[in-house]
Amino acid sequence: MARPRNQEARKRELVSVTSRLLIERGQAGARLVDIAEAASLTPAAVSYYYPDLADLYADTYETATEQYLTRRRQQVSEIAPAVERLVECIALGVPHAGTSSRAATVLLMELSALAIRRERIVASGLEFEAEQLRLFGEILDQGVAEGTMRLPYGALETARAILAVEDGIAIPVVAGRLPSDEALRVTLSVATSLTGADLLAARG
């Protein structure tokens, strides 16, 4: 690892290394000694920047969620009709093998497992969920305004239901028990029943 000019640059590099190890090896392969070796540092050097390893995990989580949300919002914002925006938003949440969506999903799953005992990750997780609900809610409100969606429940409740399906179905996909295409079909089917829009037809 090249020597950065400041402490923040070194921290960003350690976050990047930690992200890669969590994706490739899981928590068991992202211990202090593993991170130090992958970063070409001593464990003491890593501890200099992160005296508490939990703070490194928290920074990694915050970075991962920010990148995930930014990518999702950018790609969805390029689409005008609400129905097509919702289809794309849902598709981006399905972890397809060999894509950034799968890597991001695995990373977030590994880090989310730490949230039970890490206050910072809990707080970041709440904000991450709120931002995703906000994005889904904006699309659903747009669909209602366009007359292409009919919501039997409120936008927030509908967004929560879609997001819950997305989160729950990601586990069997990552574990290899459910193909990504089938996971997308199921999620779109559920979202269709909640919005009155034929999302499967819109997917093509």
Image (cartoon, rainbow, N blue to C red):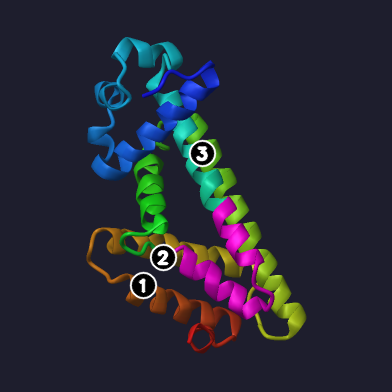
* Label 1 packing within 10 angstroms: few (<14), some (14-19), many (20+): many
Location of mark 3 (residue): 63
Disc assigned to residue 183: 1
Circles 3, 1 touching at the beta carbon (< 8 Å): no
**Residue extending farthest right:** 145
Residue, disc 2: 94
Q: What is the spatial separation of the Cα atoms under label 2 and label 1, in whole angstroms?
A: 7 Å
Q: Position of residue 84 (x, y in %)?
A: 60, 78
- The picture places residue 120, in percent across and down from the top left corner, at 51, 31
Circle 3 crowding by C-alpha within 10 Å: few under 14, some 14–19, many from 20: some
Q: Main secondary structure of the magenta part?
A: helix
| Image height of 38 relative to 63, above or below | above
Q: Image height check: is 99 above or below 83?
A: above
* Kind of residue indicated by mark 2: Val
Amino acid type assigned to the residue bearing label 3 in the image:
Thr
Q: Earlier in the sequence, mark 3 or mark 1?
A: 3
Along the polypeptide, which appears first: circle 3 or circle 2? 3
Name which of mark 2 and mark 1 comes first in the sequence: 2
Query: Range of the magenta residues?
Result: 70-93
Residue contact between numbered discs 2 and 1, judged by CB atoms under 8 Å: yes
